[in-house]
Structures are given as C-alpha cells and as structure tokens.
Amino acid sequence: MSLLRWTVLLAWVWTGGVSTALAQPSYSTAPLEAEPLLDQDAWARQGAQTFEWLGENYEKLAMAQWPQIRERLYLLIGRAAQGRYEETGLFEELADLPPTPRLFSWASRVGVIGADLIAESLADSSLGIEPGLPTDSLFEVAFEAPFLRFGAPDRGWAVRVPYYFMTWQLVRTPVEGYDTDILVTSPLHHRNLTNESTSQSTLMLVLSGQDCAAFETLWAKQAGMTEPAEPSDLVEGATLYRAIVTNGVEAEALFWTHEATCAAVIYSGLPGPFEANYVHFGDFVRALDL
C-alpha cells in the first residue's frame, strides 16, 4: 500500500469511535491529558513510514530488534488514545477505525501480549489480523474493552490495564526455587527531562508463594532499592522502597502479603515519564485482584 494511502488511513483515527466503558478498575486519565508528543500530521507521517518499513523488513528482524519497534508502535498507539480522549473526554472511547487495528496487529508480532485480541476486536473481518505469539497456557489473556485482563486461574490473580498499555512479559519462572509469576507492562510515552528523546515508564508485577520476608529482600535487591523501607497506604501492611538506579532511572517498589501470596509491584522510569505516569502505580496496584 502506498505511503499516501497509509497517511489517509492514519488520519481517519481521529473520527468516529465506539464507547465501551467499564466501571472498574479506575485508571486516571491525567497522563492522557499531557501535551502530545506528535501533532496529527507527524503522527500520520510517522505511522505511514513505520507500516511501510515493517512491510519491507519484518521477516528480516531479529528478536533483539523487537523492543525498539514495539516502543515506536506504542508511541503511535498512545497518540491515538490521546486523540480520542481529546475529542470525547473518555479513555474508554477506543480509536477503532483503520489503521489502529494494524498498529495492534504489528505490535502482537513483535511480542506485545494481547495486542492481537484488540486488533481482532476493532478490525473488519476482511483485514486478516494475524494471531499473536502464543501465551503460556497457565495464563489467561482477554480483551474486555477498554481493558486487557491478564491472570493465572490456578493462582487466583488477575489484573486489568488500559488498552494502550504495552504488556511485553508474562511468565512463570523459578526464582530461588519458587515458581514466580512476572508481568511487565508500560504506560504512555512522555518526554524525558534529561534529553530530547521520549520513553515509557514500566510496571512490573511479581507474585510468589515463598517466604515473604525473603521474597521482599530478594526483589528489593533485584530492583536496586537502596533507601530503607517505609509504610505505604496503597495496601494495608505494605512497605515501600525508593531508589535512583543506573542511568538516572527512578524506581519505587511496593511489597505486601495476601494470604499465602507474596506480592510486589516495581515501578520505574526516567525523569519525565516516571512522574507523568506515576499515578498509574497506584491505579495498577488497586486494579490487581488477588
């Protein structure tokens, strides 16, 4: 498809939409209200160039290149979400016209979990959305517009995130001899304060059934926490650590115990994105069902 036609298709995303509001969980819209990183013309132009480049080069990509590609796609997806929010005042108003399904379809092919479900939900059946990479059968992934829901039925946990979050890791892996569930997701792009580039912050969920004091010590060290723990009112009985880790990255880690489950949410990012998306740290914790 020509660059011009992709530009026209990209421009359509600012018109129309389908409202699919859910009462819970509640995620703040403050990050959507930030100044857009791209105007409409730049968004359309960069999107068209990205589609054209992927069409020509996808088969030659190494997996090591996927992170950079999916971050570019989610810069565009995030801008589409901001565009819909600017028009409607609702983040539940999905950008549901072409080429938004193609953005999610490409994202699923570079390792974004659940992106194919969004693409299938939004796309015309003739578009031919390719299935995403297989997810471990231990986990369930569902699109409950406007949220993606991730969970492990055998362990009784689930969490929802807005459709424009980029979830790129969902695994169960042995850590210190205990099977540990790890989910990693990234909210919107924002401008870095330390340079002219943009980036996303990151939310990591860690759940295990080991001794919770040992779990907290291990993962606080893994996350580079250097400051003493302090109480937190996000969850009853929780402790919070803060740190500045390598390359100026800011980080906070929240630990708590729910029945036999040790839980941690680790939030990190560069100055700028860290502050702009910070409200989602609490949103994410409150959206977790244990």
Image (cartoon, rainbow, N blue to C red):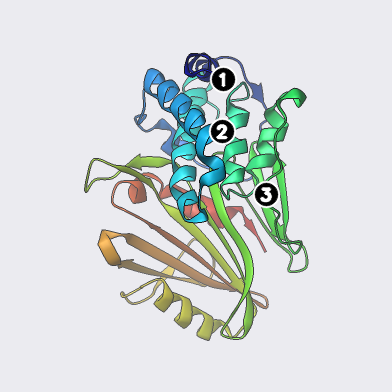
Real-space CA distance between mark 2 and mark 3, rounded to the nearest whole angstrom: 19 Å
- In the rendered image, residue 117, in percent from the top left (x then y), is placed at 70, 40
- In the rendered image, residue 113, in percent from the top left (x then y), is placed at 62, 50
Real-space CA distance between mark 3 and mark 1, rounded to the nearest whole angstrom: 33 Å
- In the rendered image, residue 73, in percent from the top left (x then y), is placed at 49, 37
- In the rendered image, residue 126, in percent from the top left (x then y), is placed at 75, 23
- Tell me which residue sits at (36%, 27%) in the image: 38
Disc 3 marks which residue?
Answer: 149
Disc 1 marks which residue?
Answer: 1
- Label 1 sits on what residue type? Met
Front in this rendered view, residue 59 or 220: 59
- Tell me which residue sits at (62%, 45%) in the image: 25
The image quadrant of residue 158 is bottom right
Q: Quadrant of the N terminus?
A: top right
Image vertical order of residue 243 relative to residue 55, above or below: below
- Tell me which residue sits at (61%, 83%) in the image: 210
